[in-house]
Amino acid sequence: MKLVSSKKRVAAISAVTAATLLSGGAAYAYWTTTGSGTGSATTAPASASVTVSQASLSGPLYPGDAAQTLNLTVTNDSTTQNAYVTSLTATITTTAGASCDASNYLINGVAATTPNTLIWTGQDLAHGASAINADNTIQFNNKPTGQNPCKGAAVTITYAAS
């Protein structure tokens, strides 16, 4: 067997090494680049609305009677959006006018002369869902003065949700 000369052997090893390095280098090559882009989204045009309804009281309001429960149902009227109700307020008006005003009534034990904040734990209502609240009361405010103008007066409670 004939031995390959040292020069030829070094040349062959160098060629194989060079080929390996070149092909290996190709595996690590990459292009650099930059770029940018945009995206978009839309939000609903309006928020959901809610309706507050009240169940009938257990009877008429009289001076000196115990408080009656205000059974309220809050309903999300939207068919697509959730509604978060943070608070409820109640305002009282009567058909008797100034002679029998809101000060003749108590909501949660406080004279109803301004919108009273009702007891309400903030709730997220799914579209079409309702929540019932029976943690509030109304009663006739038994003042030390005559309250005859309130006899037979229709009392309207207006609720506002926020």
Image (spheres, grey):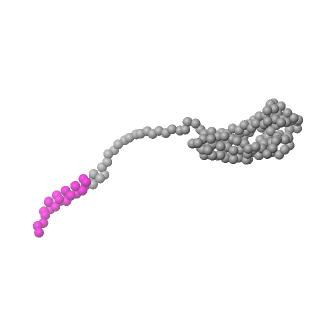
User: In percent of the image, x 53 and y 38: which residue is there?
Assistant: 43
* Residue 147 % position (x, y): 86, 35
Residue sitting at x 33%, y 44%: 32
Tell me if 38 is positioned left or right of 133 in this view. Answer: left
Magenta span contains residue 103: no
Front position in the image: 31 or 119: 119
Left or right: 69 as drawn, with respect to 63? left
* Magenta region: 1-23
Q: Main secondary structure of the magenta part?
A: helix
Determine which quarter of the picture holds residue 3.
Answer: bottom left
Residue 120 visible = no
Image point 72% across, 37% down: which residue? 158
Q: For the C terminus, give its image quadrant.
A: top right
Residue 125 occupies which quadrant of the picture?
top right
Q: Is residue 12 above or below residue 32?
A: below
Q: Is residue 4 magenta?
A: yes
> Quick one: which residue is furthest to the left in this view?
2
Residue found at the very far top of the displayed protein: 98
